[in-house]
Amino acid sequence: MSTEPVVTAYRDAPTRTIRVGDTTVAYRELGPAGGIPVVFFVHLAGTLDNWDPRIVDPIAKHRHVIAFDQRGVGGSSGKVPTTLEAAADDAYAFITALGYDLIDVFSFSMGGMIAQDLILKHPGLVRRLVLTGTGPRGGKDMDKVLWTTYWDILRAALTRSDPKEFLFFNRNATGKEAGKAFIGRLTERVTDRDKDLSLSSFHTQLKAIQRFGRSAPSDLSRITQPTLIANGDNDRMVPSVLSEDLHRRIAGSELVIYPDSGHGAIFQYHEQFAPVAVDFLGA
C-alpha cells in the first residue's frame, strides 16, 4: 500500500511523465487513488496550468483526477497532431499506457471535440462524459473559431490583457471581473509550471479545429453514456447553439446554460457548476 500523502489541491499536484510509444507524456494526478479516474481534456493552447483549481479541486475531493498535456504541448514531447482524430488516438494511447480500461471524461472546448472522437472510436472506454464549451463535428459556424480567436488575441494585445479574458468572458462589468478572477486563479501554482504552447503549434491546433468544424457530422446517437453538457448563453468561440445541438443529438443528455456568460461560463459560475459536476460524476 502506498504511503504517499493524498494530494487534494491541483496547485500541489506533481508533474509526472510516462513513455507512450515514441512520446513522453506529461501529466498530473490528485485525489484519492483507486476506482475509475476522471481524465481532463483541455482547451485550445491549454497546458496543465490552464485548469481552474475551483473546478478540479472539488472533483478531486471525491475522485482520482488525471490531467495531461497533449502531444507537443507543455511538457509532452513530439509534434502537435494536425487532426483532432489523431489527438483522440494519442489520448487513448496515454490512458491505456496508465493501465486504465474505463474512465470518466471531463472536457472543455477543443478537449470536448477530442473526447467525442475518442468515445466514438472506443465506446467501452468511457463511463460518464462531461462536455463544456464545445460542439459537434461539422456543427454550424464551428469553423469560425479561427477568426474569432485571432481577433480576440489582437484585442487582448492592444489592452495588454490575457487573451482568455476576451475569448472566455463577456466584455461587460460582470464578465471582466470574472475573467480577471479566473486568470488570477491560474497563477496559484508557483512552482513546476508548464511551458506555453509555441505559436506554430497553436496555429496547428486552430487549423485542426477548423477542419473538425468543416467535416461531415459524426453520428452522436452512438454516444449512449450519461452526458452532462454545459455552456454560457453567449459563447462566441463555440456558439452556444452548438451545446443545444449536442443535447438534441445525445439521447438522455443533461444541458446547463448559464446566463450572462460566454465560453468560460463554467469558470465564471464555478461555485454553481462544480457541485453539479461532482454529483454527475459521482452518480
Image (cartoon, rainbow, N blue to C red):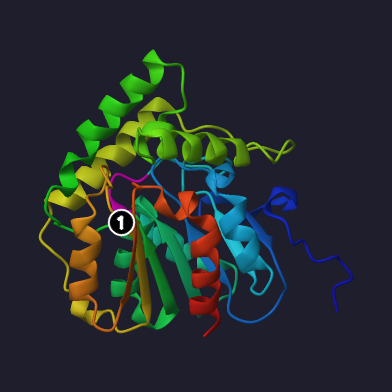
Picture layout, residue 175 above or below residue 199: below
Instruction: Check the picture and name the quadrant holding the N terminus.
Output: bottom right
Residues 228 and 101: in front is 228
Q: Which residues are magenta?
A: 81-86
Residue 156: x and y in percent read 39, 22
The residue singled out by tag 1 in the image is 134
Residue 136: x and y in percent read 21, 61
Picture layout, residue 282 above or below residue 158: below
Q: Secondary structure at mark 1?
A: loop
Left-right relation of 58 to 261 = right
Residue 254: x and y in percent read 33, 76
Left-right relation of 219 to 130 = left
Residue 271: x and y in percent read 55, 59
- Amino acid found under the numbered disc labelled 1: Thr
Q: Residue at 49% of width from left, 74% of height from top?
A: 104
Q: Residue at 41% of width from left, 29% of height from top?
A: 163
- In reply to whether residue 144 is colored magenta, the answer given is no
Extreme residue in the right direction:
3
Q: In the rendered image, is residue 94 in sight?
A: no
